[in-house]
Each structure stands twice: as structure tokens, then as C-alpha cells.
Image: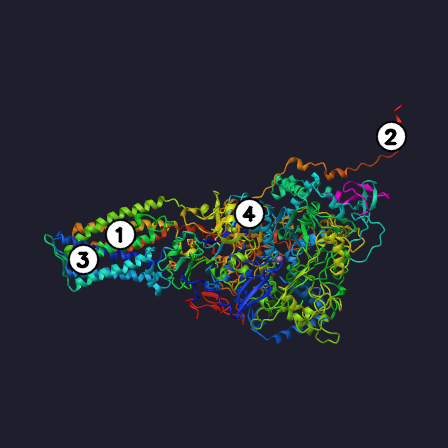
Amino acid sequence: MTQLALVIDLNVCVGCHACVTSCKEWNTSGLSGPLSDFNAYGKDPTGTFFNRVQTFEVGVYPNTETVHFPKSCLHCEEPPCVPVCPTGASYKRAEDGIVLVDYDKCIGCKYCSWACPYGARELDENQKVMKKCTLCVDRIYDMNLPERERRPACVLSCPASARLFGDIHDPESEVSRAIREQGGFELMPEWGTKPANHYLPRRKMRLHLHEDELVRADNPLKKEEYMPKPDINEPTLDDVMPW
Amino acid sequence: MAPTYRADEPIPSEDRTGERKLDTTCYMCACRCGIRVTLKDGKVRYIEGNPDHPLNKGVICAKGASGIMKQYSPARLTKPLKRKAGAVRGEGKFEAISWEETFQILEERLGNIRATDPKQFALYTGRDQMQALTGLFAKQFGTPNYAAHGGFCSVNMAAGMVYTIGGSFWEFGGPDLDRAKLFVMIGTAEDHHSNPMKIALSQFKRNGGRFIAINPVRTGYAAIADEWVPIKPGTDGALFLALIHEILALGLYDRDFLVKYTNSAELVNMDEKSSEYGMFVRTEVPVEEGCFDPQNKLWWDREADRPVLSHAEGVDPFLMGEFALKDGTPVKPAFQLLKERVAEYTPEWAAGITGIPVETIRRLAHEMGVVARDQRIELPIAWTDAWGHEHQTMTGNPVSFHAMRGLAAHSNGFHTIRALSILMTVLGTIDRPGGFRHKAPFPRPIPPCPKTPSTPLAVKPNTPLDGMVLGWPADPDDLFVDDDGEPVRLDKAFSWEYPLAVHGLMHNAITNAWRGDPYKIDTLLIFMANMAWNSSMNTVNVRDMMADRDENGDYKIPFIVVADAFMSETVAFADLVLPDTTYLERHDVMSLLDRPISEFDGPVDSVRVPVLPPTGDCKPFQEVLIEIGSRLKLPAFVHADGRRKFRDYPDFIINYETEPGSGIGFLSGWRGNGGEKTLRGAPNPRQWEMYAANDCHYHYELPRSYQYMRNWNRGYLDWAQRHRLTRYAEPILIHLYSEVLQSFRLAAQGKGISRLPPQRLRKRVETFFDPLPFYYEPLESQRTDTAKYPLNAITQRPMAMYHSWDSQNAWLRQIHAHNYLYVNPKLAKGLGIDDGDWIWVESQWGKVRCMCRFSEAVEPGTVWTWNAIGKASGAWNLSPDANESQKGFLLNHLISEELPPEPVTGTRCSNSDPVTGQAAWFDVRVRIYKADAAEPEQTSPQFKPMTTPPGVRKRPKLWQALFGGSSEFDMSHTGERS
Amino acid sequence: MHPAFSVIFLTVLLGFGQGTFLALATAEIYAYFDLLPMPPQSYFNAAGAFVALAFLTGGLFASFFHLGRPERAWRTATKWRTSWLSREVIALPAFMGAVFLYLLVHFFEWNPVIIERIGAPPVTLSLVIVAIGTVLAFVLFVCTAMIYASLKFLQEWHTPLTVINYILIGGASGFLFTAVLASIVQPDLTYFFGGLSALLLVLATGTRIASLIRNLRLRPKSTLQTAIGVHHRQIAQKTQGAMGGSFNTREFFHGKSPLFLKSARWGFLVTAFLVPFALTIVAIAIERPEPLFLAVAIQAAGLLVERWFFFAEANHPQNIYYQSIA
Ligand SMILES: Nc1nc2c(c(=O)[nH]1)N[C@H]1C(S)=C(S)[C@@H](COP(=O)(O)OP(=O)(O)OC[C@H]3O[C@@H](n4cnc5c(=O)[nH]c(N)nc54)[C@H](O)[C@@H]3O)O[C@H]1N2
Ligand SMILES: Nc1nc2c(c(=O)[nH]1)N[C@H]1C(S)=C(S)[C@@H](COP(=O)(O)OP(=O)(O)OC[C@H]3O[C@@H](n4cnc5c(=O)[nH]c(N)nc54)[C@H](O)[C@@H]3O)O[C@H]1N2
Ligand code: SF4
Ligand code: SF4
Ligand code: SF4
Ligand code: SF4
Ligand code: SF4
Ligand SMILES: [Mo]
């Protein structure tokens, strides 16, 4: 069975928020829009976003790592948010594993958001229905779009290509390979939700120098030893040796 | 309610009837990515990156994707405005007027100025991408008082590198991350090459490159670095000099590169009594007129042990040593002088200044040197050098650097950047695979040819300025000063105070005009710069100056015109407001005459075409300039008989030529009648359509053999000359040793053969015009009680905000609604400050109350904040209690536009680099302390809330939801759409 | 979690309603086995059923305030196979129906005998309804409590104690209320209900304190480390990605200080348990109903605090992701 998902490479994510606003932009006017904003030009502006980028600091100065951390619905394989929904508005699609909300059924009881350990759902407080990442289901199957564009908006936008998209059940897919080869991990594995979205860890590139690399035969300094020829008239042994 | 999905039904496809996709160029920032705008029924549905665009290859950034919310922002100006009779400047009380009235006011006022004293008109432009046009307008008007943002932005970067290698970072060149193995990024948070940098950086990391970030702060790009090297602000010069020291000491430099492609081996006159002291020794080779660097210097032949003409066939010169010419003149190769210069600059010395451990400094030098030497790239590209030697391969030493304002925005930035350029040079990484690479029209001769006039006589009534408004002085005779050596320009650029101020000093213009030093002006036109806020230092006082009146009750700056698209802080100070269109509503050109979007592989320029009609009475500022230019009968805009030459801006772009028949215009692509010519050719009436049909850009890919080593590449140089990118096709040798600087120093020492600086500035010029880079503590620190103000305060650009202009953007402001001062917990705890506390930040100039946020990712002697998030209350049509004004703050209040008077002479100088006039934003020293518990939880200073002028739409209350493509907004309370 | 007043009222009122009905049921069963000096009279039962129904209706009414789109509330009944919320939505009207029938039976005093067996008292319609109603009351308790107890990430709730507490607290409050009602309508039953309410209160106090102790000892299973998959001892969030707050910052955190929380805990222990218990004992001892009135009033207030605390105390793991703005 297909399980579509995002794989987010923390090794290259620079925290630019492109995925945040391109998601908002696509979806507010898309099939699952609008995404309402409250106090858009006033105090404490707030609104519905499907994807947020957060920042964490790891370690103590000067050994600090700054980690940018994008998070949207993880499309869990065992999604705790789905069975709790009393109306069936929340569901997981059998054919591709995308977890969706049917706004026409949702009563805005928020129970599903309580059941999501990841804080990935957001109630649209204007429309009073629960919203969340749809994995851009209205893009990826839209045959009116060129094939290249049949990918989530956030994936297309990401300047660092830190967001991979594909079927994690297909072992040959780019995402499966990335998870396998680069140590892809799940968030909060302790709950057994089996998030479909995975994250790739930071990696470090180091250089090891050997002593002898700093002293080499072809050192150009050798060419700079200025040895002017002595004046022909300067004393030599020729002047004193009798034989 | 929007249609949604049913568990039991297939996902419906979006209804795409009434949809159109149009390509244009983004302008949510200066990066200029290609975008594809989807319109539905004439409304923006979606903006995405254009996959066929060379710059961004389909990606977009947070700002670009929020363009819709800029288009529909409630902060937009939509009508020309005149200050209400009787209203006080700064109150922002306006009446709407017609464009005809607007033009009449301008025509009359500017006409009078031009007929009497053109320099009474000053034109300053901020994040403008058409300086070629605004500069042309100023020149045609005849005023010397023109500058764009470069002086307060990063002119140190441009000048420091262009005067050294003939090209620069910024938009003019960059690191070849495609082939680099080691990449060192210094003092960069975001930069103009926003998306391309991110694309390249992730590719570089995926390919296994090693990435080192040198920055007092670890965020953004530095976050994903393999190694973060925290450094004390303003000390990078010391680090680079120590790296050069170590590299020279170990012989890790690229000798061959230095000999052939730089002036390292050229012999410098060391006779202190000579008027040529410190200049290169020249032989009798006929000197050509102009800007270029004649190849008439000497080398010392290693084999023959005698001086020879540089680049003499088969000669291997000494780089080190000291010699005497036949006439007894002592000489040394320039490289020897560099070696002597860095002798004292040991890693141990630098460690004490930079705060970087000495082992780290050594290791960095070794890594750079060994990677450059041992991981050398050989590309199978044959090329011919400027001396006619053929090379079978193109070699590269794969160590790349990138640096920006972290180096530039310090008063020692010019020399720091010279030091970095020289570091890159000794590693042999200039315009080579895996190193630094130029972008057309760079490299330029050193210095580039354009010059300003050099005398006040060049400013004459009813006459265009005799010379360029901005230029590149090669020696003191190129300065724009009067007989006493005093400035001709209002901002004092190109004077002895800031001789190489190649981008002007906008940050001093208002203060100077207010004070009448060097003179008073009449009309100040500000375009796309928020000078009453974030692009001025000392903002509180500058605002007062803008509204200040003399004894007669007249404004000290009599007339202020602001051309803006939004309700910025500066708009409140205008007498006349010209409402501009947004980038989606106008034609624009990113021209080779200005700042094109060239790639490493060749010139690229691009355009914007309108995808939407103008909103309200908005008019593109370009159209306004052409209209005024035509009405004032500026020669470039009218025929000889005074008839208007250009219908409008698009017509101007197509038909304007730099000189009649020159074939050089704003756009380089599809020139010639049928679009068959490149770079140079007759005007093409269908040029706009051809750009529009080609993703709004023109990309000329150079032959592979012309893509590297362009300073010395015969093929490239000839090509550039033939296509009139440059006048000369001489090799552009790297100025490891700068004779240009030495010529100013000689003048200051009274030795030169040119003009001499006024007495009060001699010491200053002598000190700072050192032909070799040296380290000095930033000027402000030198004149600050650093025991009292121990900390450095700096800013960074957030990736999701552009300067001051995105707070009006409903989506972006949710990411950065206000800002904190980031403080290392170790520092804060010692001061009894806790995370989230309200604190005071105080410099010797002023103080600001704000909130503190702990961060382990900042050097403990440094505090920092995001730039320009704080706003004045009510500006940008935000509610007066918006976070931006109540919790957000502007660091600029703490930064002075002038330095404390010089202790001995009492001379007043700009808070800028003494060589280039670059604004020293990052020099400010501060202390922090906890705010009293009784104080309000609100930032200080506060300003009276700005009033909303006519034509600006009401901001929506409570809910807002964009549903692009159908109706603009849904602002109902229920969220039900009909 | 952020305690929503709709849910606080919903659960407290339902508890009252269920408890009251269970009290009536207990009296009837006692009477059936002839353990009461004087069986409950129809008018008493009717009054009691009316009050219980009023509580339940009030709860139902409050629940609508919790829904964003109450007009679609009917849909909530569809997912009873998986959702405790859905089950509650079915159990509540079913239970209310039983109470309503019970009200009718006693209001119209039409209580035919349904089963007659030799050697045992006849089983009346009322008794049958009592049996069904009792089952439904417990089902409803379980459904309501399981809405919370089934969420395993909310470790404070994810325990059988949640179900037990809902039953015992609801029961105690209902019995106490019934005692007060009896003191007005059928005073001879006052101390029967009073005594049972005191007993239930003792049990409830025990299990509630047990849950408090358990929760104080809980170690959160999710940490910053598991949340972002970085294994380092020192991790701190700097930005949560939205400065003006978001649904995630409003829905899952009470926004009150630890001190406030602590006061609330002691507050409800005193007002919902200790004081009502003491007053009930006093009432029984002095055989005067007035202290019971006071006890009900104080307990009602205390239970609102208890329920507020119940929600506030629950620490949602999602909060790990929403700690800091900058
Ligand atoms: N998103 C976004 N992009 C932008 C802009 C924007 O406003 N928003 N503005 C555009 C403009 S006009 C410009 S000029 C460019 C500028 O782009 P950048 O040059 O990246 O400018 P800053 O954000 O000022 O970054 C300065 C960096 O230098 C560091 N720094 C400060 N002092 C020192 C020092 O002494 N040594 C070292 N090593 N580092 C130091 C700071 O910590 C910071 O990381 O960005 C452009 N791009
Ligand atoms: N403390 C501190 N201060 C700094 C810096 C720093 O690092 N630290 N950086 C400095 C640098 S590098 C720069 S470049 C400056 C930038 O400073 P400014 O040049 O002042 O830039 P903005 O704030 O973007 O303001 C530009 C103005 O252009 C307007 N605008 C936007 N779009 C349009 C348009 O399409 N047409 C017209 N006519 N107007 C438009 C905006 O509304 C705004 O009023 O700030 C400088 N100030
Ligand atoms: S767009 Fe890509 S790089 Fe930017 S924050 Fe999102 S994932 Fe990270
Ligand atoms: S991340 Fe949350 S909302 Fe998404 S499927 Fe998993 S539990 Fe459900
Ligand atoms: S809020 Fe909507 S989707 Fe979530 S549980 Fe309630 S009905 Fe289901
Ligand atoms: S997949 Fe689509 S809906 Fe989900 S975060 Fe990305 S852009 Fe948003
Ligand atoms: S980087 Fe600048 S030009 Fe490119 S998409 Fe972003 S805002 Fe637009
Ligand atoms: Mo800038």
C-alpha cells in the first residue's frame, strides 16, 4: 500500500519559512481554504497555518547547534486523531495514507487535536472546523497541472530542497532511500503513532590533516631564498691557499 | 464554505477556468527571482517560483510566496497626497490631489531649482533596482546630490573587493559552490542572493563539502555549518591577517597564481624621500589615457638577478626579498611588503582580539591552504591568457568564501575586506573553479572607469552634470571637491573625508541638509527608502530634523517628496507623496547598466512586466521620472526641439541609448531591429515581448573557455571589449598592493603630485590609506568608554522579512511580529537578567527598552536582534497597539550617524568607514540592564501614532481570509463565503 | 490543557444528573428489598427525575458551546465504533430518555407491574427503567471519562482512575443533591442519601487523591529529545514559528502560573471534598438539613474548580513544541 509522506532533511534546512508561507498561499485559496487570520494588522496577529518552522538551540556556547525544525501533520500510519473523531470528518485515505479532514462533516469539537501528540492540527477559529496539512492532495493528483508541479507546494518552494516527497512504502523511492541511508527518524516514537513523515539528522563534515601535509618538498618558499652572487673581488680561499 | 474532500469521493481538481499564468520577476526582495503568477478572473490566486528561471530554478522564499498579501495590503498608498495646509510635517495629515496637480508642483519647483542652482535638489533612493534610471535623471538634472542605498548598505564590500580584484561579492560575484570543497561564510545572514545561496548551499553540503561559518551569531545559514567559529564583531580583519600570516609562513600560497595574476612580484619604490615612494617602479612604456592599469611595472628576475619588465617571457620573479635598482633606488616586491605587514599579525595576536582560540586560527589556515593545494581541480577547458599563453586546462583551488555586511558594516570594513580579498588571492581562488567567480559585467578594471566630476564648476544651471553622479576615484585628482579640498556633494562623498565613497553616504544626507553643512538644499526626493526609520541612524533626531524649522518658521529642509508604495514612517514627513505601484503592477528592468542578475557563466538581465493593473491612482515611479524629465526638458528625455522623446517607461527602455546610435541600452537581450543582436544593437520595438516570452530574462552563456580567469582571459577580455562591457581589454591584475590607496597617502604626506587634503584631514587620510590592509579597532570603539559600554550590538536580517516593508504583510508578520534582544545567558545572568525580562539597551547615544531572549548561539560579548522589525505606532496601517510598535524595537535609535568629534582637532565625521563612507551600523557599543519593575511593559521610545491618509483603505477588523482568485478577501465573522 | 467552560459545565452537570438518578435508583432498589423505613414516593421520584433531567439538559446545552458547528451535532453519533465521544453522544440521549420515562412514570403515577414472581416483590415498570437507566448512567460515565482516559499521550488522564473518579464524584454530588431534595420533598430519606453521599465522598476523595499523587509522580514520556529527535541533554526552543500565538498555544495550555494551579488543587480538595463531607456529617449528627444546603452549594463550586484543574493539570505533549517565541 502506498503511504505518501514528507521527509525533512534537518541537515540542510536553513529555517527560511518558505515552506510556511507557500503552504499558506496554496491552501488558503485551494480546495481546503481559506485559512483565516485574526487581527491580521493588529495586536497579536494569529491565524491558521498547516506548517510551521521552529528553532531550537542544542548545547551550550560555544558548542551550540541551532536546529531549524519544520513541522506539519505527519500523516501517521496509526493516526490517533482519526478514530477519536465522532463524525468521521477525520479520516485516513486507504489508497495513499493521507490523513484528511472533511470540513463539511467536521463539527469543530477539537477532539482530534487533543488526540494528536504533535500539535499538528489547527482549528480555523473563523470557520470553526479543524484544519491541517493535506499533503497538498489537491495538487498532487491535479491532472491539469504539469507533472513536475504535482507535488506539495512546500516541497516545490523549499530553496534548500530540504523537503522530499514520496511513498515511504516503496523501498525504491527517493524518500525510502533517504530514510534508510541517512538515518531517517520518527518524532515521538514512544507513542506508536508511526508517523509517515520522517526527519533526516544533521551530519558533520570534518577534515583531517596530517603533519606532513604542512611541510612539503614543493614548498614555494624555497624559491624565495635570495642568494646574490658574491662580488668577484670579495676574498676567497684562492687568495690564501698556497697550493 | 469551500468544497472539501469526502472519504468516499475522488479529490476534485481545482476549477481552472478563468485562470491565466503570467511570468514576471519577484520584488519581495532584491534577489529578483523569476516568478509565475496564476491569476484567476483577474485576481492573484498563486505565486510560485518559475522553474525555467536561472536564478531560482522554481523555488521561492517566504517573502516571495507572501506577495499576494503585499498586493492586497491595507498599507498601500493609492492617491497622490499633499500635506494639508497648516498641518505640521510629521503629523501625516494629507489631502489627496490629482497627478496633474502633482506634476505641476514638481515641474515648477524643480524647474526653478534647475534654472538657478541644481544642487539644491537631492535625490536619494533606497532598495531601488533601477539606479541606472534614477542616476541618469539626477545627472540630466545637473545635481551632484544623488545616491542609492549602497553607502548605508555594503559599499565596503564593493569597494574593498573591486579595488582589489576587480569584482566583488554582493550581486557582483560569489562562491562557486558547485565545485568548492571547503566553504567559509563570514558575516552573512541572508544577502541579496537569497534563493540561489540556499540552493547552492544545500547542494554543496549534499555533495560532501565542508562548511565553516564565521559569525558572532549562529542562525540561518550558519546553523547548518559543519563548524561555527564565533568571533567578536569588528575583528575579522585581525583574523584574516593572521590567516595570511600562517599561510605565508608555511608556504601554503599559490605562488604561480600570485606571480602571474597579481601585482605581488611587482617592485615597489622604497625610497622614502621620493615623491614616488610606495608606488610601483615603472619603465618607459607609453601611458594610455584613462582608467586602466598599464603593464609597465618591473619584476626582479630570479635567474638573472636583475629587474625586468613584468610578465617578461620566460621569467620567474622573486616574490620576496629586497633589491636595489641601478640608480640605487631600493625596491621590494609587493609580496615582500605583505609578508612584512603580516609579520606581527600572528595567530596568537589575533586570538586575543577575535576571541578565537589560537589552535582554531592555525587549523583554519591549514585547512584552507591544504585543500586549495591538494584538492586542486583541473577542468578540461583550454584557454588563452592575456599574455598569449595557451593553457590546456582550467585549474581551481576549491576553497570558497562568501562574506557580506558582517564585514562591510564596520568602520574598519574596507581594510578587512581587502584582507579577505588578499587571503582569497594567496590561495589562488579568484575566478577559478571552486573559488570566487565573477558575474558580468565584472571583472572591471581596477578601479573601474566611471568618474564623477572633480570640480564644483561641473554643476551648472540648466545643464546636465559634467560627469557621473557616482564613480571610482583612481587618485586624489578624481575627488569631487572645490579648490580648498571641501566637498561639492551634500553627503560629502568623494571628498577627503570619504574619498572612495563610491555609493555615496545617504545616511548623512538629512543631517547635513538640516545643518546646512556643506550647504542647504531646497527639495529632497526620497524614493523607496524609509529614511525616517530604518535606513537612518539616530532615528529619533533625524525625524526631528525632518520636521525642524528655523527662526522664521520655515522648514530647514524646505520641501520633501516621498515616492513610496506604502504607508511607511517616512511618508508622514512628506510634503508631497507619490504613490508607486507594486511590483506586480509595473514594468521594471534589472539592467546590465545597474545590477543585473548575471550568472557565473555569463550576463543575465531581466524584466518585470505588469500582471495586474495599477491600484487606485498609483503610478510607477519610472513613469513619474520620465514625465518630469520630459516636462523639465532634460536632454535625455526630449528631442533637440524640446519635444517629448518617450511615450512612457516601456518606450524609454526600448529606445534609450547611452549615446545616440551607441546600441547600448537598458536591456541587453534581443537588440537590433528584429532581436537578432546581443548586448549591443539598435533598439528593437518588440524587445518587451521577447523578454516576456522568455521567462522575463535574457541569459547569454559565455563559451566555457571564457567563463573563468576573466581578469586575464584573452578570449573573455576581447569579447567584453567587443561587446562594450569594457573599454579596455588589458589584463586586470589583482591589486594585492594598492597603489590607488598609496596615491592618497602620498597626498596626505604632502608628497604626491596631485591635490592635497585640507590640513585637518591629513592625518586621517595618511592613516587609513594604507596600501596594504591593516587592523584597527572600529572607530566608535576607539572613542567609547568600553568599560562602560562593553558589549557589541548588531542586527541580522530575518529570512522571512524584508527590511521595514513586510510588517504590513499579514502572513509574514505572524512569523516576526516583534523582536527581542538576544543575549547569551552567561552574560545575562551576571547582570541579573532573566529570559523574557524587559531590559534597557543603552549606548552613548541613546537607549531603548525591549525584551531579552536567552541564546546560546551568540558570542557572550555580543547582543543582537532582527533588523527593522520594530515599527512606529500606526505606521504601515497597523493598529497603534500592534506588536511591532509596542514590543518591537529598532536598534537604530542607539546608533549615531556621526562619530564623537576627534579628540585633538574636533573634526566631526560620519560614523562610517573613513575610506568609503560605509555606514558603520555594527560598531555601536552598548550596555544592558534590567528595566524597573514599575516601568510599562512597552518598548521605548514611542512615537505619536501615525494617522491614515486619504486613499488608504481601512484595515480589516478581526477576521480576514484570503481566497485568491474569487473575491479578494473574506472578512466576515462566520467565514461563510457566498 | 486549556479548560473550556463548556466542557467543565458539561461534565459537572452530567455528573450531577447521573448521580441524582443513581440516588433515586438506589432508593428504589433499597425499597424493593424493603430496606427503607418508608419507600420513596412518586412525587419525590418525579421531582428527582425532573432535577436530574434538568442537569442533563443543562450539560447537553453546555456541550453545544464546545462545538464549532453545533448545527452538525447530529453527525457525532456516527462513529460509535471507534470514538468515545461518539459513544457519549449516543449514551447521553439514551440515558436522558430513561430518566424522562422515569419522570413520566412517577409524574403520572402509572407504574404497572411488569414481572410478578412468587416469593419476591413485583417488579414494576419503574424498576425496569431504574435497571436500564442505571446501566446507561454507568455507560455514560464510562463514555465521558474514556473520552479523556483513552488519550494515551495525556498521561494524567490515561488511567482507570479517571473513570472511577468520574463515577464516584458524579455519584457523590448527585447523592448529596438528592439528600437536599429529599429534605424538602420527602424528609425521611434525607439522611439515607446524606449518609450514602458521605460514603461516596470518602471513596471519591481517596481515588481523587490517588490520581493527584499519581499525576505528581508522572514522568512525561515525551521530551524535547524525542520530540525533535536530537539526543542532547541541553535543548531549548527559541521560536515556535508564530509570535502572536496560534491554536496550539491557546488550546493546550491553561496560561496560569504554577502557584495558581497549586491553589486550585488545594482549593478543590477542600471545597469539593472536605467541607461537603464535614457538613454532611454535621447534618447527620445534628439531624438538621441546613448544613446539607451549604454543602451542595460549596461542593458545586468546588467541583467546577476540580474539573478546571482536571483539564489544566493535563500536560499535552504537543506543548513541547510551543514553548517560546522570538
Ligand atoms: N530576507 C531578507 N533578505 C535580505 C534583506 C532583508 O531585509 N531580508 N536585505 C537585503 C539587503 S539590503 C542586504 S544589504 C543584504 C545583507 O545581507 P547580510 O550581509 O547577510 O546582512 P545582515 O543580515 O546584516 O547580516 C550580517 C551578518 O553579519 C554578522 N556580523 C555582524 N558583525 C560581524 C562581524 O564583525 N564579523 C562577522 N564575521 N560577522 C558579523 C551578523 O551576525 C549577521 O549574521 O541582505 C539582503 N537580503
Ligand atoms: N540597524 C540597522 N539598520 C540598517 C541595516 C542594518 O543592518 N542594521 N541595514 C541597512 C541596509 S543594508 C539597508 S539596504 C537599509 C534599507 O533601508 P531602506 O532602503 O529604508 O529599506 P526599506 O525599509 O525596505 O524601505 C524601503 C521603502 O520602500 C518602500 N517600497 C517597497 N516597495 C516599493 C515599491 O515598489 N515602490 C516604492 N516606491 N516604494 C516601495 C517601502 O514601503 C519602504 O518605505 O537599511 C539599513 N539600515
Ligand atoms: S523551505 Fe526548506 S529550508 Fe526553508 S524552512 Fe522550510 S524546509 Fe527549511
Ligand atoms: S500528526 Fe497528528 S494530525 Fe497528523 S496524522 Fe499524526 S496524529 Fe493525526
Ligand atoms: S474537530 Fe472535526 S475532525 Fe476533529 S474530531 Fe471534531 S469533528 Fe472530527
Ligand atoms: S504538503 Fe501541502 S499542506 Fe502539507 S505542509 Fe506542505 S504545502 Fe502545506
Ligand atoms: S528571494 Fe527575494 S526575489 Fe526571490 S522569491 Fe524571495 S523575495 Fe522574491
Ligand atoms: Mo542593504
* Depth check, front residue: B190 or B94: B190
Q: Nearer the viewer, mark 3 or mark 1?
A: 3
Residue B646 image offset from top left, x and y in percent: 69, 73
Q: How many marks?
A: 4
Say whether residue B586 is magenta.
Answer: no
Query: Where is mark 3, residue-wise?
Result: C128
Looking at the rendered structure, which numbered label has been put on residue A235? 2
Q: Secondary structure at mark 2?
A: loop
Residue B433: which disc?
Answer: none
Residue type at mark 2: give it: Pro
Residues at discs 1 and 2 in contact (Cβ within 8 Å): no
Q: Which residues are magenta?
A: B311-338
The residue indicated by pointer 4 is B858
Given this view, does label 3 or label 2 mark the residue nearer the observer? 3
CA distance separating discs 1 and 2: 117 Å
Mark yes or no: residue C326 visible: no
Q: Position of residue B445 (x, y in %)?
A: 74, 55
Residue B552 percent across, percent down from the top left:
63, 69
